Every structure is written in C-alpha cells, then in structure tokens.
Amino acid sequence: MELLLIIGPALGVGLISGLIGFYLRNTLVTKSQKAAFSASQDQLRIAEERSKEILIEAKEKGIQLITETERELRTERKNIQNSQRKLDDSQSEINIQLTELKSKEDKLKIELEKAKEEKKELESLKEIEIEQIEKISDISMKDAKEILFKRAEENINFDIGKRYRNAEIEMKEKIDSEARNIISSAIQKLASEVVGEETVSSVSLPNEEMKGRLIGRDGRNIRSIEAATGVDLIVDEGPESVAISCFDPIRRAIAVTSLEHLISDGRIHPARIEDIVEKSKREVNRTIKKEGENAIFETSIKSIHPDLIPMMGRLKYRYSYGENVLQHSIETSHLASMMAHELGAKVEVCRIGGFLHDIGKAFTHEIDGPHAEIGADIARKYEVGKDIETVIREHHDSEMTTTESFIVAAADAISAARPGARRDTLEAYTKRLKEIEDVGNSFDGVERCYAIQAGRELRVLVNPDEIDDIESATIARKIVKQIEEKLSYPGQIRVVVIRESRSIEFAQ
C-alpha cells in the first residue's frame, strides 16, 4: 500500500511532464513551420515582382528595337526611292541624248549623201573640162602636167644646185678650219695611255707542294675552283705558277684574288674554296666601287647618282676592241667637255654624257638590246637629265637632234681612233664565247654556264632538283645540236653537263 502511495504520485508527475513536453514540442514545430512558410511567401513575392520587372524591361526593349528598326527601314526606303529617282532621271537624260544623237546621225547621213552627189557632179564637170582643154590644145592633160613639172623641176634644181654648191664650198672651208682648231686643241690637252687587252693572268706558287695541294686529290680542288669561278686554270709542269684563262675579266679577277687567298691561307679543300670565292667576290665588288669613284674624281663630275658609280666601275674590267671601256669613257668625257667649251655648248651635259655614254656595255650580257639603248634606259631610270639621256641614246645614231650629241659622238670616235687605243681581237672573241654561253643558259634547269678553253669547252651546271642524270645527257645533246645549227666556230666544242648533289649533316 505504501508502495502504491509512493509510485502513484511519481507516475502522475511523469505523466504531467510528458504532456507538457509534448505540448511544448508541438508549439515549437508549429512556429518553425509558420516562419518557413512566411519566408517562402516573401521569396515568392520577390520573385514575382522581379519577373514583372524583367517582363516590363523586355517589353520596353522590344518596343525600342521595333521603333529603331522601323526608323532604319524608313530611312533605307527613302534612300532607295532617291536612288531610283536618280536612276530614272539619268535614264531620261540618256534617252534624250540618244534621241539627239540619232537625229544628228540622220542629218549627217543626209549631208554625206549630198556631199557624195556633189563630188560626183564635180568629177563629171572636171572630166568635161579636161576633154575640152585637150581638144583645144591638141595635147592630153597628163602630157601637159609632165611637161610643166619637168621644166619647173629643171629650173628649180639648177637654182638649188648652184646655191647649194656655193654654200657647200663656203661652209666646208669654214667648218674644216674650225673643226681642226677645236679637235686639235682638245687632243693637245689630253694625254692618255695606250691600253692593251688581257685575257690571261697568272699567280705565282711558292713551291711544288703548293701546286699539288692546289690541284688536290684526283684534281678535285682545281675542279672546284673552276666550277666556282667559271675560269680555266692551266697548271704546267715547268714554272711555279698557275695561269688563269677567261674571257670575262671580272671572273678572272675573282679567280686571281681567290687563289692568292688560298695560297696564303694554306687550307685548300672544296668547302674552303667556296668560302674564299665568296669573300673574293665581295673584295672585287669593293674594288669596282673604288674604281668608279676614282673615275668620277678624275672627270671632275660634281653630282651623279650613287648607284651609277659601281656600274661605271664595272667597265674597268670591260674591253672593246682591246680598249678598256672605263678609260675610254674618261677620255671621251674630257674631250667632249673641252670641245663643248670651245663651241659654247652645254659643258656639263657633254662631260657627264661622254662619261656615261658606254654604261650600257656593263649590262650587255644581262640585258638584250644595243648598249646605247640600254645606257639611255639606265640614265632615265636614275634621272640624270633628258639632255644626257638623249646624248647616250644618239651617240651611235646616224641622225642626231642636239649639238651635245654631235660633240659626244665626235669625242667617242676620236678616243677610239687614236693610235694604240684599240685592236680588233677581244671584241669578236668575247662575243663568240658569250654566244656559246647563251645557248647553254637558254635551257630550263640550267643554273650557270662557263665557256672555257678559249671556247673549246662549255661547262653547264644544272639544278639537281630539276634535272636527273638522264635529262642531263639529253640537255648535253640538245646544246650540241643548237651550237651546230646557230654558231660558226673553228674545230670542235666539248659540252660538259655537271649535276652535283650534296647531302650535309652535322655530328653533335
């Protein structure tokens, strides 16, 4: 009983505590749900408001875009209408002009027909008149014309011949005396050298060992030098020297310089030879420029285009009938300027024109055409002046348009005709070798051609990427055939086609 009295209140207290806890828990859960619902309602309201704002903005942008598009369409439509209006106006004007032209054409046709009819009437009247005259005079019109013209011609020829003879006698006396004075004065003021030609140079060798090294194993070094420079090397057993034969003096100068460097350096092999030849080419080019500058200084020319200086320097290595072309140009410049002083002509035009008159010879193997035309084109390119260009172009013409052209042509002839100036040997020789080389260079795939052994051998270097071994033999036969058909030469010409292929790798 006591136990029940103790347990009963305890159970009551526990039950009450459980009921209170349940109530409190339900209350808290309900508040949390309400708070969450309220928050979700707020977010939903905000989202609806934002969506309304976005919709309003989209509508506004859409309206704005539609408005702008309509405005652009109206503008474009207006432009199209204006263009169409202009086209209509132009078409109307064209139609009016066509109508006017048609009307004029019709009028011209009518007038042309009238003119033809009038011409026929005149011809008919003329024939009638001639017939009447022939009946009256008892001689035909043709015979009358011939008699009249013959008598008039005889009288005119007699008067002209008489006056011409008198004038010719008088002018010859004056001109001959004056020309002798001017030319004698100019020649006396100029003292020039006798220039000889040179087609062979030699380089001394220090000993027989150097000769062997220069030749190389199986002659590979000497072949490399000949291929790189385009010259013919002649090594005799006797004297300790090597002869360099080549009709092109620039190639010969490069070969001489290359051999001197190789002998001095001592390292002689194909790769070194190629490097030395390139270096020698640069040295010769510097020498060419220096020779041009010296020639400008010697002729007292104050202003000339810088690019013309090395062009004139190249003439130091060119010969015409055995005469050095650069020396000949300097002489011509001096003579022309002195004669221009005496005659009161344009001195500077004669001085520069005489100096540049043969500049075309520096490019005759590169550009087709007479050297006078080539030189005149160069003068025009570098804007030396119209008068000088005319002098260069006309210095070999039979008809000359300026006094300066006559003076330069006379100076050119005097320089060439003086004793010891020329010999008729190298020009023909050089021309023949150039023609042989031109035949080889005319074929596709050919890189370079060298005529050596005084024209008895033609070496043709071909591109190994374009020409194979079979095509090399074909090219050799074709070159031989063209040489036989086009050229005249003594003896025989050996054609050697060289196809060289190199593969280079480096060991690291």
Image (cartoon, grey):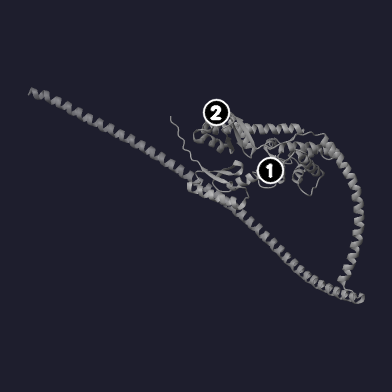
The location of residue 63, given as percent across then percent down, is 52, 48
Rendering quarter of residue 161: bottom right
Tell me the quarter of the image containing the N terminus. top left
Q: Secondary structure at mark 2?
A: helix
Mark 1 falls on what kind of element? helix
x, y (%) of residue 320?
70, 41
Query: What residue is drawn where x is 80% and y is 37%?
Result: 335
Residue at the outermost left position: 1
Label count reads 2
User: Quick check: 290 left or right of 447?
Assistant: right
Q: Amino acid at mark 2?
A: Glu
**271 relative to 102 in the view: left or right:** left
Mark 2–mark 1 Cα distance, whole angstroms, equals 37 Å
Kind of residue at disc 1: Glu
Q: Nearer the viewer, residue 32 or 238?
A: 238
Whether residue 223 is visible: yes
* Mark identifier at residue 427: 1
- Displayed quadrant of residue 115: bottom right
Q: Residue at x 45, y 34 (%)?
A: 505
In the rendered view, does 143 fall on the left or right side of 445?
right
Identify the residue at horizontal 87%, vertical 72% (top origin). 141
At label 2, counting other C-alpha atoms closer than 10 Å, the crowd grade (few under 14, some 14-19, many 20 or more) is some
User: Which is in the foreground here, disc 2 or disc 1?
Assistant: 2
Q: Which residue is mark 2?
A: 208
Counting from the top left corner in percent of width and height, residue 478 is at 55, 51
Q: Is residue 188 left or right of residue 454?
A: right
Tag shown at residue 113: none
Residue 301 visible, this orientation: no
